[in-house]
Amino acid sequence: MCEMLAASFPEARPFSDLAEAAAGLEAYGLGSFGWGVAWLGDGVVRGTRGLGRFRDEGMTDERLRQTFSRRFLVHLRRPSQLSTIQMADTQPFFDGTASAWCHNGFLERADELRHEFEDELQGRADSEVGWRFFLRRRAEGLDACSALRAVDETFGGKANLGVLSADGELALYSQNVTNRMWRFSIDEGDFASTDLHSDDSSVFDLVFPKAYDRQRVEARTAFLLATAD
């Protein structure tokens, strides 16, 4: 039920360049129940999160707006279960400063597989179970795209996934058929975004009117928006 936005630039840009787009995704999509932003900085992944609306909290956060980076990953939350509105379930999830991970949709087998990660979980949402599974697959040697695909193949349901790594790699996976992902460019930046749960091109009319090279991502596609440095 959430919205996701990923951006990659050849040179560092201020997050303020993305703030209006993030607010638009939240306003026209199904956000407003928490938000988070991850970015690449000095060889590590940094980030910030809030439990309210991005347009109320993130838009007025001067430190965030003035943050410069070549990679950003934004998550605008609308949980399937409103009882999970707490910081432990707010995304992106952070693996220290090594990576940030987020999810849009529903992981069908999360409750069934939760017991395998019980000692590692801090929240109650299905997303965290998928994230812990992803981290194990990475620890076993899978690359980011393969590990994202493994989450979908194991859990089922409808999942869009994204991960930003400290080496600069930005990987995504599209499988939420009710909130498809698009790839596109604006100026010199490469972007990926969910489509406002609207099965048309309204996300461009309402949020990204300057976008070009617009490509709808096929279901069950893992891709790199940015490679490692």
Image: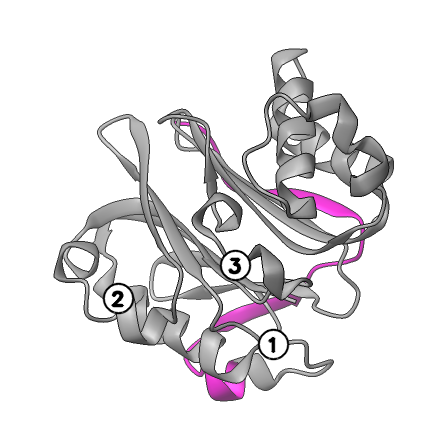
Horizontal side, residue 108 vs residue 10: left or right: right
* Residue 178, picture quadrant: bottom right
Seen at 26% across and 66% down, the residue is: 17
Mark 1 highlights which residue?
Answer: 196
Q: Is residue 208 visible?
A: no
Query: Mark 1: which secondary structure?
Result: loop
Distance of label 1 from label 3 (alpha carbons): 21 Å
* Residue 91 drawn above or below residue 122: below
Mark 2 highlights which residue?
Answer: 17
The magenta span reads 204-229
Q: Is residue 144 visible?
A: yes
Seen at 40% across and 54% down, the residue is: 36
Given the image, on which type of amino acid does mark 1 rest? Leu
Given the image, on which type of amino acid does mark 3 rest? Ile
Mark 3 highlights which residue?
Answer: 85
Instruction: Report x, y in % for residue 206.
Output: 48, 87
Task: Give the class, few, some or many, for how many residues have Cα within 10 Å of label 2's Cα (few <14, many ≥20).
Answer: few
Horizontal side, residue 225 vs residue 153: left or right: left
